[in-house]
Amino acid sequence: MQNSSIDILISRLLSNNITDDERKVLDEWLSESPDNKKYLGQLINIWQSSHPAFDPEEIQMESAIRDIHHKIEAAGSLSQGKSFKILVWWQRIAAVLFIPVIVLMGYLLSRDTDFNPQTAYQEVFSPYGVRSKISLPDGSSVWLNSGSKLKYPIEFKSGSRNVSLTGEAFFEVRSDKKNPFVVHTEQMKVEATGTAFNVEAYETDTIVAVTLVHGKVDVDISGRRKLDMQPNQRICFNNLSNKYKLSTVDTYKWIAWKDGVLAFRDDRLDYVFKKIGLMYNVEISVKDVDIASQLYRATFEGESLDEILNLLKLSAPIRYEYTKRVKSESGAFTKEKIEVYKR
């Protein structure tokens, strides 16, 4: 079939003016060759580039840059602790300006999946050391924790509202009982209609967890167990043991991160350092088993990394050492590392 004829059919598809007969012709053409699917994907990319999901005019770049310069000039001479705060502040500014740029359009063209090949998807990644807030097409809100990725359609279709998560996110779902909101992770599927809940699903962790603040959710664990959760409950699933635990908890501890707060309630010190490292984009390792298992209770809000480490050193028998960052062949530096020892 001539490319010009196919281009016409594709343009009708993208503008939602295609007839059933034309759709059948296009489906047959797609099934003829992987190159045809690739060609369709290229045209969809061009279409989406000219019809972005956000308005570039809303990004006030010049104003943002002026504000940055004013803050830098006002900061003056900085101590090490203040320098770290500025670094974290710069990361957050970069995330706000960069999120529209890192939005990636993904198109699944295989008709063997549950995804519609005509649907455009966005993938938003929250850089390490940064938290991000996203507004979904249905009015729901999502907070992405450091190093997390969310994939969702530009427009939700009738039936269900499906999103995919890797990492950690807090969801405030707009109520719509006819169109359930479904979060897909590698090990769990969480279904809600109108509720607020937190999902932890980092690829490097053995624990996947859901914490329900209010409303109701159904949790499907690997397609084998389906559980109904009530407010103030938390489900933890261990990938290694293939076991889960349902318990009643203080939800604040598990969702405080979205407001920049680290809340620890009798948690192991190695877990405390893990969460601190995640928020401040550093790799912290505890080198002594005895102190790693010690329980700690504290709340940190607004402190720099150095301030938190000093507070921990005052209240726990520890000392810590920084290791130098190494420059790779590509010119990038490795993540900053801190080793914690028993004092």
Image (cartoon, rainbow, N blue to C red):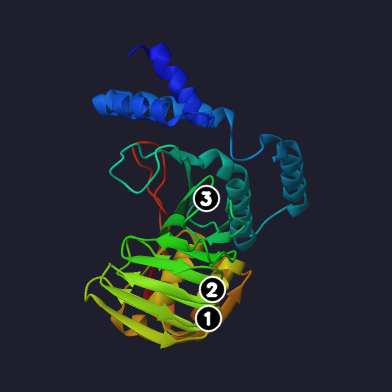
Question: Which quarter of the rendering shows the N terminus?
Answer: top left
Q: Amino acid at mark 1?
A: Thr
Q: Which residue is mark 1?
A: 251
> In this orientation, which residue lies closer to the viewer: 19 or 248?
19
Question: Distance from label 1 to label 3 (Cα)?
Answer: 29 Å
Could you say whether the residue bearing mark 2 is in a helix, strand or loop?
A: helix
Rendering coords of residue 167 (x, y %): 42, 60
Rendering coords of residue 326 (x, y %): 37, 48
Q: Amino acid at mark 2?
A: Ile
**Which quadrant of the structure image shows residue 143?**
bottom right
Task: Give the answer, above or below, for where 327 lies relative to 32.
Answer: below
Question: Which quarter of the rendering shows the C terminus?
Answer: bottom left
**Which quadrant of the structure image shows residue 50?**
top right
Within-10-Å neighbours for mark 1: few <14, some 14–19, many 20+: some
Q: Which residue is mark 2?
A: 255
Tell me which residue sits at (31%, 78%) in the image: 288
Q: Amino acid at mark 3?
A: Phe
Q: Is residue 208 visible?
A: no
Question: Distance from label 2 to label 3 (Cα)?
Answer: 26 Å
Q: Which mark is residue 156?
A: 3
Rendering coords of residue 322 (x, y %): 43, 62
Tell me which residue sits at (64%, 60%) in the image: 82
Left or right, residue 98 beside residue 35: right
Tell me which residue sits at (76%, 40%) in the image: 63
> In this orientation, which residue lies closer to the viewer: 298 or 62?
62
Left or right, residue 203 beside residue 95: left
Question: Distance from label 2 to label 1 (Cα)?
Answer: 6 Å
